[in-house]
Image (cartoon, rainbow, N blue to C red):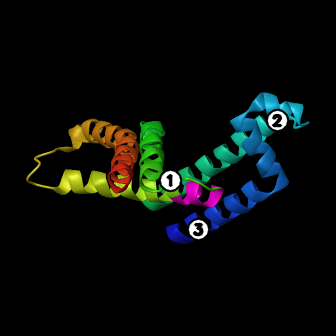
Amino acid sequence: MFIIVVMVSLLLLWRFMKSETGLAMRATGANPRMARAQGIATGAMIVLGVAVSNGLVGLAGALFAQSQGAADVTMGVGVIVIGLASLIGGEAVLTPSTVLRALIACVIGAIVYRLAIALALNADFLGLQAQDLNLITAVLVTLAIVLPGVRTSVAARLTRKKA
């Protein structure tokens, strides 16, 4: 069920981002002054962006509460860090050159993040406990930030060696 919801949400978001309104929203996010000069109501685009993101957050929260069987006020603590780690990790794995690739990178990043956390906590040879979750997240975010730079420098070295 979750896979279907993720795929439908991804498809709808991709279609929206390809529309004229989605393009205006992307332009507002990239350069608000230029978007305003092109006649885009940047205030309305910001409100629409917040509404779409809050709708997706509400859907995610509802699905999470449904899968857990209950809801609690503290369920969302640390979600911003997890989202950041997933986003940065996804962009490190899959370079977002198009809107569809960026959306797929977000999904891949979330999956990779959860797998890395599960592997780190279940690997007995590492000796990590549940209270080490912040350390694991910090290491994953650091690796995700450093990985694109390392990839670029290695590609540049290989290009120089071939030339």
Q: Which mark is residue 120?
A: none
> Which image quarter: residue 12?
bottom right
Q: Position of residue 6 (x, y in %)?
A: 56, 64
- Amino acid type shown at disc 3: Met
Q: Position of residue 150 (x, y in %)?
A: 34, 44
Span highlighted in magenta in the image:
99-104
Residue occupying the point 64% across, 55% down: 99
Work out how far the residue at label 2 is from the one at label 3, CA to CA, in angstroms: 30 Å
Dominant SS type (magenta) = helix
- Amino acid type shown at disc 1: Thr
Q: Earlier in the sequence, mark 2 or mark 1?
A: 2
Q: In screen coordinates, is 121 left or right of 117?
A: left
In the image shown, does 99 or 45 lie closer to the viewer? 99
Q: Are marks 2 and 1 in contact (CB under 8 Å)?
A: no
Q: Residues within 10 Å of mark 3 (few under 14, many from 20)?
A: some
Q: In screen coordinates, is 76 left or right of 138?
A: right
Q: Residues within 10 Å of mark 1 (few under 14, many from 20)?
A: few
Residue 139 higher or lower than 163, as above or below: above
In the image shown, does 148 or 60 lie closer to the viewer? 148
For the image, the number of numbered tags is: 3
Residue occupying the point 65% across, 45% down: 53
- Amino acid type shown at disc 2: Ala
| Label 3 vs label 1, nearer the camera | 1
The residue that mark 3 highlights is 7
> Which image quarter: residue 81?
top left
The residue that mark 2 highlights is 35
Residue 33 higher or lower than 7, as above or below: above
Q: Secondary structure at mark 2?
A: helix
The residue that mark 1 highlights is 95
